[in-house]
Amino acid sequence: QVQLVESGGGLVQAGGSLRLSCVASGSISYINAMGWYRQGSGKERELVAVDFSVGETDYADSVKGRFAISRDNAKNTVYLQMTSLKPEDTAVYYCKARIWEETVFRDYWGQGTQVTISS
């Protein structure tokens, strides 16, 4: 069984920074993509950033230039460095990993970590 555990959320003022971490543990042979999603109150979950494991990353337009995703493959960990935070970044942030299991890729989600930005 694979588990994803996020950490690093909290309450910060607008303009501040936070660094989120997500560690994948369990029976893991290969992790393809790892990414971050967020869901604000009353909103749908949306992609924030993804790392495709081949040196490629992608970001939502709303966070480009402010957020940076990175991975430590040896630790099965993905990070999200968030800077110049805005109140509209307030959301629950979820980590997702696409993991190879025998014959297919399977997606796993973390439980989420709350990020609140005060104005």
Image: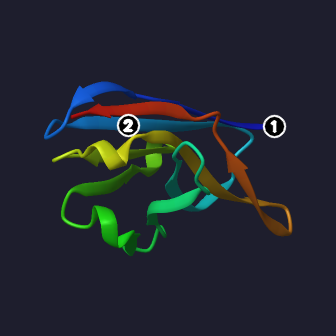
Q: Residue at x 46, y 64 (%)?
A: 50
Seen as rendered, the residue at the extreme top is 11
Within-10-Å neighbours for mark 2: few <14, some 14–19, many 20+: many
* Residue 47 x, y percent position in the rendering: 51, 63
Seen as rendered, the residue at the extreme right is 103
Which of the two discs, 1 and 2, labels the residue nearer the N terminus?
1
Q: Residue at x 64, y 33 (%)?
A: 111
Q: Residue at x 16, y 47 (%)?
A: 84
* Residue 30 x, y percent position in the rendering: 64, 58
Q: Is residue 59 above or below residue 107?
A: below
Disc 1 designates what residue? Answer: 1
Q: Quadrant of residue 54?
A: bottom left
Q: Quadrant of residue 61?
A: bottom left
19 relative to 52 in the view: left or right: left
Between 71 and 60, the one lying in front of the other is: 60
Between 25 and 85, the one lying in front of the other is: 85
* Residue 41 x, y percent position in the rendering: 55, 42
Q: Amino acid at mark 1?
A: Gln
Marks 1/2: CA–CA distance: 23 Å
Disc 2 designates what residue? Answer: 20
* Residue 108 x, y percent position in the rendering: 71, 49
Q: Is residue 72 above or below residue 54?
A: above
Q: Secondary structure at mark 2?
A: strand
Q: Which mark is residue 62?
A: none
Q: Amino acid at mark 2?
A: Leu
Q: Is residue 47 above or below residue 15?
A: below
97 relative to 83 in the view: left or right: right
**Quarter of the rendering occupied by the N terminus:** top right
Tell me the mark number nearer the camera, choosing from 1 and 2: 2
